[in-house]
Image (spheres, rainbow, N blue to C red):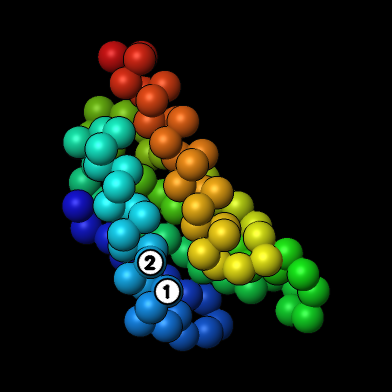
């Protein structure tokens, strides 16, 4: 699976990118056919809590793209919550087969 990380208006650290790759790779356990993942990170309303937004779009052949976007205090937290939401969506797509 190809994973693209796009940080809007800032540079994501190597550590953050490794965290994202590790979390998103685990989604393959729930659906082996994922070909690509696009992760978008952005800061909404600077200087406030809960201002880190992470959106993850998964490309799965023969399915509509699967997407989740979450806002949290940290990017790691937002990624965790978004990945959990994607897991649930992937389970549904498997049942729909």
- The residue closer to the viewer here, 4 or 23, is 23
44 on left or right of 76: right
Q: Which mark is residue 36?
A: none
Q: Which residue is mark 2?
A: 19
1 on left or right of 27: left
Does residue 54 show up?
A: no
17 is higher (above) or lower (below) than 30: below
| Residue at 42% over, 60% down | 39
Q: Residues within 10 Å of mark 2 (few under 14, many from 20)?
A: some
Considering the numbered disc 2 on the image, is that residue within a helix, a strand or a loop? Answer: helix
Q: Quadrant of residue 44?
A: bottom right
Do residues under tags 2 and 1 come within 8 Å of each other at their CB atoms? Answer: yes
20 is higher (above) or lower (below) than 70: below
Residue 45 percent location from the top left of the image = 76, 73
- The residue closer to the viewer here, 23 or 63, is 23
Does residue 7 show up?
A: yes
Q: Which mark is residue 16?
A: 1
Residue 82 percent location from the top left of the image = 52, 48
Considering the numbered disc 1 on the image, is that residue within a helix, a strand or a loop? Answer: helix
Q: Quadrant of residue 91?
A: top left
| Residue at 65% over, 57% down | 71
Spot the residue most to the top: 96
| Residue at 36% over, 72% down | 17
Position of the C terminus, as image quadrant, is: top left
């Amino acid at each position: 699976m190809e994973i693209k990380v796009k940080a809007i208006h800032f540079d994501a650290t190597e550590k953050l990118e490794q965290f994202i790759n590790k979390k998103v790779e685990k989604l393959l356990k729930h659906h082996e056919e994922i070909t690509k993942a696009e992760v978008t990170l952005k800061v909404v309303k600077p200087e406030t809590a809960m201002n880190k937004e992470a959106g993850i779009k998964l490309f799965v052949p023969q399915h509509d793209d699967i997407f989740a976007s979450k806002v949290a205090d940290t990017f790691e937290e937002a990624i965790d919550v978004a990945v959990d939401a994607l897991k649930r969506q992937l389970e549904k797509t498997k049942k729909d087969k």
